Amino acid sequence: MDKLVYLFGGGRTDGSAEMKELLGGKGANLAEMARLGIPVPPGFTITTEVCRYYIEHGGRYPSGLEDQVKEGVKHLEEATGRSFGDPENPLLVSVRSGAPVSMPGMMDTILNLGLNDESVKGLARKTSPRFAYDAYRRLLAMYGSVVLGVKDEGGAGVDPFDAAMEELKRERGAASDLDLTADDLAELVARYKELIRKAGKEFPQDPHEQLWGAIGAVFSSWDNERARIYRRLNRIPDTLGTAVNVQAMVFGNLGENSGTGVAFTRDPATGENRFYGEYLLNAQGEDVVAGIRTPKPISELERDMPQVYRQLLEVREKLERHYRDMQDIEFTIEEGKLYLLQTRTGKRTGFAAVRIAVEMVEEGLITEKEAILRIDPAEQLSQLLQPIFDPAEKAKAKVLAKGLPAGPGAATGRIALTAEEAVRLEKEGQPVILVRHETSPEDIQGMAVAKGILTSRGGMTSHAAVVARQIGKVAVVGCDGLNVDYEKREISAGGVTLKEGDWISIDGTTGEVLEGKVPTMASEVVQVLIEETLAPEEAPVYRLYEKLMTWVDQYRVLGVRANADEPDQARVALAFGAEGIGLCRTEHMFFGEDRIPYVQQAIIGRDPAARKEALERLGKMQAEDFEGLLRVMDGKPVIIRLLDPPMHEFLPKDDAEIAELAKRFGLDKEELKAQIESLHEFNPMLGHRGCRLGITHPDLYDMQVAAIFRAAAALRKEGLDPKPYVMVPLVGHVNEMRAVRERIDEIARRTMEEEGVEIAYKVGTMIEVPRAAITADEIAQAAEFFSFGTNDLTQMTFGYSRDDAGKFIQEYLKSKILPDDPFQTLDRKGVGELMKMGKEKGRSTRPDLSVGICGEHGGESRSVHFCHEIGLDYVSASPYRIPVARLAAAQAALKG
Ligand code: ADP
Ligand code: MG
Ligand code: MG
């Protein structure tokens, strides 16, 4: 650790965009912009290494830092011609946090640092008293809350400095902060100092002391509660640390020829290729984002300051061409001169992600591969499949208000006015719309559980909008017509008052807020592909999806199949690109109203003739099921798993149901009850199920196998090409596989003979018991394909019951005992190792063994990556996850 401080701007730039790990995103990009010749106020960056040192050493700094910071300050003094602490012409700086990955709103920035009671007077003489006291009061407020920790006592979440400002505005009859005079602001300075004193703190007059206080506060903020929650939600490692940027101030609040703004180089909600942003004249820093005044759309800057606007358009071009991605920028105009203060890859909705990626390929900015790698499968691509409001239903609903469309999609739910209430309602299983004046990082958990977010203040770059886009929530922000009354726990808009807990709907594509619960309908993609109610020509979102997915399929190596039991599901799966059925769970076919009695009779019937008849009836119905499925999937493999669950799942539990069943079969009620009880198991998941059942009750499997081949035969006679693969569940020993297989082959042969047709088929097994993975070489002697059943395999590898583990897994995740829920994301080290072993051992016996996965993990991106890495042939996922699996598979292939 030699170099702890990197300079940028003012003619000397040490860092570059490549150095994000060390300089944080903000610092690295400030350096990069300086290199590109974009005007950036000079500054220096203290590295993330220092942060790690600081956290590990209980708030101490590595030796040498002090000197290097001094050098840094000297760089700023030379570049600006001002000096730090000069009472006449003080150098003012901002102290800004900046981690390697952006964490919006997680850590606070301090502006105007370097001012004190003396230099504020000097500044007033040099500029204007109003400006100087405005700068000073901002410093006091930021320093007071961020560094000195002066917070609201009452716990209502109101910043005491904001409250003092509101109070003074009321006293002076001022509508906005712009209406306050220099004297008013000087008065505010006095009140702010009083607030700080009352809290038992003191604002340091020495600029160097201010600087070190601020640096320490930024480093400490890496470890605060909200930063930690954010990192957990976004899987950001705690060890990254943040950098600190110290930068010469430029002022957007020097009058009407100055201003500040934020912009995106493309529309972050829709992805449209247009410059998109907001600004305020005579304002500083976060004023635009904080929703204090309503900002103006960037297009108006063309009239307000045509030159600056043109210059900004040039910067936009330059940045997009250089970074080859949509950028989110901050700028400040000081007396007609433009400065860039930040650029970073802009957060965007799923719609925007797909549109920008596809259009950038068409513009020749990026390659198809890059486009594929840029889209998050689960968070972004899947947004394109989510429902929208049914226009007919929406037309009937009352529009209460209109805000800014910050996160597209449709959401309907119960109103929650606080994050806590949102969390509480969600726990009750209620859909929630979180409604706030504006959101802040404290609300993050409420936002995460809400279906949608609605705010009355703030623009498209407010906290609510930025976070909603990132976590893929429907959002409407800055809804002026909406009144939120936290005290009365109600909201009102368009002449309607709604209580907390009432239903409300928001359309994040149009910004409309609607009364009540508005029914939704399928997304554009689903309308075109599945419902076939929309033509591709009329579906721009679909066309982007289609283009992207064509590229995806060119690069992907893994096959993608579907977990589907019914023809309708199979049709959906096909439309989404499934190349076969990886898992048909036959037990799902047993639960229908018209079937369960026969299932019950087949299980408990004492009379062999009646049992046989029940099985025959079931066989007919199963044959129809299989015929439907095989017909839809004609020419593609369809893996049908024989019955898996324990038998008592099909039997009634309470007395009345048992009585009814007894009556139906003419049995004695008590006797039936005893029989059902005899089937009871203490641990059914490890009990009499899967192939164990097939071996002790062969007639059940016989019936299913005969049905499969009867169905295939019927289709073959129609000239179709059915490909039935029979899969045996829960095999742990090769002898189980042999026993079941023998019978399957026998029934298959007999059925085909009866039907007079030959059908090529395969018999394979689930690998879901650890012993099966360990002895896979033996099992492969009798099995022609493997499919990892990772739900059971995870359950049995960890020894966690799938049905009961929820409680402690949540605890485990919080305390980081487990990095992820292994039922959601495949556990590479344990379960994954078994899979690797199973695949390798299996192939050692049978080199052409087909190996796939059909557990829930087959539709989860990171698990799909793993399956690619270990060389599986395919993943199988539920129909709506198939696009996600295809994209994840392509990404895995491209990342190699
Ligand atoms: P965040 O990460 O929350 O966006 P920033 O460090 O980017 O925090 O700063 C907050 C606000 O202050 C931004 O609007 C930024 O443009 C502004 N700002 C930061 N440093 C300066 C500076 N040196 N001069 C003028 N404005 C600044
Ligand atoms: Mg901030
Ligand atoms: Mg910023």
Image (spheres, rainbow, N blue to C red):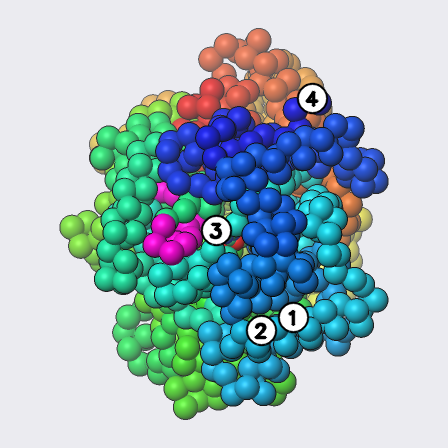
Q: What is the spatial separation of the Cα atoms under label 2 and label 4, in whole angstroms?
A: 44 Å
Q: Quadrant of ligand 2?
A: bottom right
Query: Disc 2 marks which residue?
Result: 185
Query: Disc 4 marks which residue?
Result: 2
Of labels 2 and 3, earlier in sequence is: 2
> Looking at the image, which residue sits at the far left?
537
Q: Which span is picked out in magenta?
A: 325-337
- Whether residue 54 appears in magenta in the rendering, the answer is no
* Residue located 43% across and 50% down the image: 330
Label at residue 250:
3
Select label 2 or label 4 by which is in front: 2
> Looking at the image, which residue sits at the far bottom?
495
> Given the image, on which type of amino acid does mark 4 rest?
Asp
Task: Determine the main secondary structure of the stretch shown in magenta.
Answer: strand
Q: Nearer the viewer, residue 799 or 756?
A: 799
For mark 2, does the 10 Å Cα neighbourhood hold few (<14), some (14 to 19), or many (20 or more) residues?
Answer: many
Residue 187 higher or lower than 141, as above or below: below
* Residue located 48% across and 88% down the image: 497
Quadrant of the rendered image containing residue 344: top left
Q: What is the spatial separation of the Cα atoms under label 1 and label 3, in whole angstroms?
A: 21 Å
Q: Is mark 2 within 8 Å of ligand 1?
A: no
Residue 42 higher or lower than 665, as above or below: above
Of labels 1 and 3, earlier in sequence is: 1
Question: Could you tell me which secondary element the residue under label 1 belongs to?
Answer: helix
* Residue located 55% across and 12% down the image: 843
Quadrant of the rendered image containing residue 670: bottom right
> Given the image, on which type of amino acid does mark 2 rest?
Leu
Q: Is mark 3 within 8 Å of ligand 1?
A: yes
